[in-house]
Image: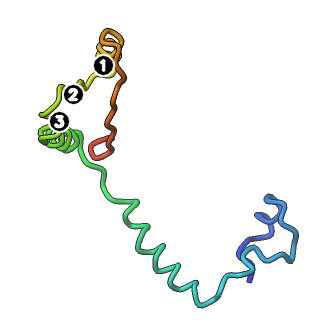
Amino acid sequence: MAFATSASRFASGIPAGHDLWPNMKPHLLLPMAALLGALLPAQNRPQPSQADLVQKRTEKLAKPVFQKAPWVHDYDQAREQAKKDGKLIFAYFTRSYAA
């Protein structure tokens, strides 16, 4: 069972008559389609507003882990301080409030 059109076969260099997924079992198509159908709506969820993002950032920075050490939130300031003190920079990255 081939899943590519003639044009895509031509563009990809796959010879005609070659099965793209020779080991694909037909009974797996329905579960795969259901999984894809369940995941696609998550891609279209509304984006949070800037105010929501700021609130999430504020809540995250209020956690105890950020209160127990002198975290610097400005990269340039952190570089200057690290150079002055002869120390390395420990960076914590998250996407929970990134736009």
Looking at the picture, does residue 54 appear above or below residue 14? above
Quadrant for the N terminus in the image: bottom right
Name the residue type under label 3. Answer: Phe
Position of the C terminus, as image quadrant, is top left
Q: Which residue is drawn at 80% across and 58% down?
A: 11
| Image: 98 above or below 76 | below
Give the residue displayed 46% in from the left and 76% down from the top. 35
Identify the residue under disc 1. 78
Residue 66: mark: 3
Check the image and tell me how it is coloured.
Answer: rainbow
Q: How much space separates mark 1 and mark 3, taking CA atoms?
A: 15 Å
Amino acid identity at mark 2:
Trp
User: Is the residue 37 above or below the residue 86 in the image?
Assistant: below
First of labels 1, 2 by sequence position: 2
Label pair 1/2, CB-CB below 8 angstroms? no
Inter-mark Cα distance, 1 to 2:
9 Å
Pick whichever, 24 or 62, lies toward us.
62
Q: Looking at the image, is mark 2 or mark 3 earlier in the sequence?
A: 3
Tell me if label 2 and label 3 are in contact, CB under 8 Å.
yes
Residue 81, given in percent of the width and then of the height, sits at: 29, 14
> Residue 88 falls in which quadrant of the image?
top left
State the SS at label 3: helix
Which residue appears farthest toward the bottom when viewing the image? 27
Q: Which labelled disc corresponds to residue 71?
A: 2
